[in-house]
């Protein structure tokens, strides 16, 4: 299956997106050039990242690199709906050369490592 390209447009006067998400797969299997950081506050389900299919667990944090196909499928329970916080940003959201500075080399390494996705 071919992933869909999703164009992400930050609100005016913002350089990144912050939103709450129900993990209900509204965008389907997709990719975008932005880096994505997702924190699952509550809920379970299945996450699809690249060629990986694994269960979602509450309190996990996932970092996805640029253009990495992914999708989330939260499961509704009697207790509560799944809830996550999503932050999407480009490498240049703090300025073009921010991650090139020696003091932030460890962050560049982390972002490069997210090319296939990182689970915390």
Image (cartoon, rainbow, N blue to C red):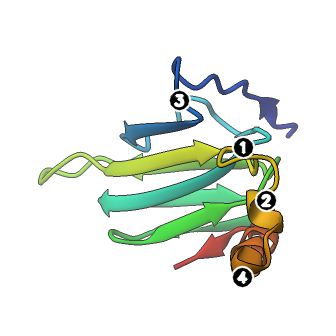
Q: Do the residues labelled 4 and 2 touch (CB within 8 Å)?
A: no
Q: Which of marks 4 and 1 is nearer the N terminus?
A: 1
Whether 34 is drawn above or below 77: the answer is above
Q: Which of marks 4 and 2 is in front?
A: 4
Image location (x, y in percent) of residue 42: 27, 60
Q: Nearer the viewer, mark 3 or mark 2?
A: 3
Q: Distance between the residues labelled 1 and 2?
A: 15 Å
Mark 2 falls on what kind of element? loop
Q: Are marks 1 and 2 in contact (CB under 8 Å)?
A: no
**Mark 2 surroundings within 10 Å by alpha-carbon count, few (fewer than 14), some (14 through 19), many (20 or more):** some
Residue marked by disc 2: 50
Q: Earlier in the sequence, mark 4 or mark 2?
A: 2
Mark 3 falls on what kind of element? loop
Q: Nearer the viewer, mark 1 or mark 2?
A: 1
Whether 41 is drawn above or below 1: the answer is below
Mark 1 falls on what kind of element? loop
Toward the viewer: 104 or 67?
Answer: 104
């Amino acid at each position: 299956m071919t992933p869909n390209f999703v164009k992400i447009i930050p609100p005016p006067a913002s350089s990144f997106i912050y939103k709450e998400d129900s993990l209900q797969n509204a965008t389907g299997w997709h990719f975008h050039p932005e880096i994505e950081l997702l924190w699952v506050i509550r809920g379970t389900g299945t996450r699809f990242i690249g060629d990986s299919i694994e269960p979602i667990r509450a309190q996990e944090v996932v970092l996805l690199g640029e253009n990495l196909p992914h999708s989330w499928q939260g499961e509704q329970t009697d207790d509560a709906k799944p809830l996550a916080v999503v932050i999407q940003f480009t490498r240049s959201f703090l300025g073009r050369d921010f991650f090139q500075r020696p003091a932030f080399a460890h962050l560049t390494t982390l972002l490069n490592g997210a090319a296939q996705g990182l689970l915390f």
